[in-house]
Image (cartoon, helix red, strand yellow):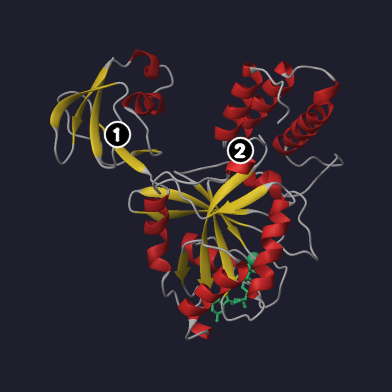
Amino acid sequence: MPANLTPEYRAAADALRRARDPEVRLECLREMLRVIPKHKGTDHLQGDLKRRIRELEEELAGPRKGGARSGPALVVRPEGAAQVALLGPPNSGKSLLHSRLTGSGAKVAPFPFTTLYPEPGMMTVEDVQLQLVDLPPLAARHPVNWIGSTLQSADAALLVVDIADPDSVQQVEEVRSELAARRVGLTPRWPADPPGEGLAEEEDDPFFHALPALLVANKADLDPDAASDAAALEDLAGLDYPVLVVSAETGAGLEALGPWLFRRLGLVRVYTKAPGKPADHGRPFVLRPGATVADVARLVHRDLADHVRFARLWNATHSGHHAGRDHPVADGDVIELHA
Ligand SMILES: Nc1nc2c(ncn2[C@@H]2O[C@H](COP(=O)(O)OP(=O)(O)OP(=O)(O)O)[C@@H](O)[C@H]2O)c(=O)[nH]1
Ligand SMILES: [Mg+2]
C-alpha cells in the first residue's frame, strides 16, 4: 500500500478486510474510493477500487436479460455461522462431498469440469449451520476469472484432492497459483489456533484474502495408504495444511469434518435468556473468537450494543455472575443482557 494513505483510508481498508457480506463490502469499497487521497501516486489504486466497485455492483444487481452479464449468481450471500468454499482440481470429488454433507444434489460426474457455477448448501453441526459452497475446479487450462470475487465472502476453504491420483502435487500447485493470480491465499492457520506467524508480507494489500485451509484427502477408498500419501503430497508441494482423510463415496471420515470445522473456526455459541425465564436453547447466537457481551447484544438487536451495561452469565463455573460489556464470551455460555 502506498505510504501516504490517510488513517481514514486505512480504517475503511480494515473494515473491508473484516467484512464478508457483499453489500457491506461494497460500502467499504465506496468509502475507500471516497476518502482516498486523489493524486498521481494513487491512480492505480483508484482504478482498482473503481473496477471492484463496478464488478460487485453488477454481481449484486443479479442476472439481467440482455445486460452485461446474464446467468447464475457468482456471489454467494453468506448464511449460517460461516461460509466454507470447496476448492480443488477437476474431478477430485468436491461435488460428491458437497452433496453428501449438505444434501444439495450437486451434479457429480466421472469426468472433469462438471461444476460450472457456485452452488451453496447448508451443513448442520450440532445446533449450528455452516454454509458449504461447491465451486468449479481450478486448473491452469481452465481459468475461472470470477473466483476471486466469489471467495471474498468465504471464511475458510476445503482443498479437496483425489489422493489416489499421482498428479495431485502438480494439481495442487495449479490450484494455488490460480488463486494467487487473484490475490487469494490458502493458509494453514485457523482462527482457533494460538497466535503466531501470519501472512505478514501480504498484510499491506487490502485486497489480499487469506483463507484458512484444510487439505481433504478424498477417495481414500481407492488408496490404502491415503494418510501417508497425503503427508507425502504436502512434503512435495511444500505445504503444511491440516489434513483430513475421507471418502465421499463410502462416507468414511466425513463425520469428523463438521466438528473439525466448528472447532478450528473457533465458533462460540451463546444462548440468551430473559430475566426469570429459562435459556433459549433452540437457537444459539454464533460468534467468532474474542467476541464480547457487547457483540452478543449487537446480534440480538443492532441498537442494543450501545445500550447494554452488563450481562449475567451462566456456564460451568459461573451461575448468574455479572459480566461487563467487554467480557469475552465462551462456547456454551448462557447470558441475560441488561441495558
Ligand atoms: N471412489 C471414489 N470416487 C469418488 C469419490 N469422490 C468422488 N468420486 C467420483 O469422482 C468423480 C468426480 O466427482 P465430482 O464430485 O463430480 O468431482 P468434482 O471435484 O466436483 O469435479 P469438477 O466439478 O469437474 O471439478 C465422480 O465419478 C465421483 O463419483 C470417492 O471418495 N471415492
Ligand atoms: Mg464438481
Query: Which residue does the numbered mark 2 point to in the structure image?
Result: 203
Q: Which quadrant holds residue 34?
A: top right
Q: Residue at x 53, y 85 (%)?
A: 222
Task: Identify the residue under disc 1.
Answer: 329
Q: Nearer the viewer, residue 17 or 122?
A: 17
Q: Amino acid at mark 1?
A: Val
10 Å crowding of disc 2: few (<14), some (14-19), many (20+):
some
The answer to whether residue 110 is above or below residue 205 is below
Task: Name the quadrant where ligand 1 sits.
Answer: bottom right
Mark 1 is surrounded, within 10 Å at the Cα level, by few (under 14), some (14 to 19) or many (20 or more) other residues, namely many
Quadrant of image for the C terminus: top left
Where residue 315 sits, quadrant-wise, is: top left
The amino acid at mark 2 is Glu
Q: Is residue 1 left or right of residue 158?
A: right
Specify whether residue 249 is in view. yes
Q: Secondary structure at mark 1?
A: loop
Q: Nearer the viewer, residue 220 or 104?
A: 220
Residue 148: x %, y % from top left? 70, 47
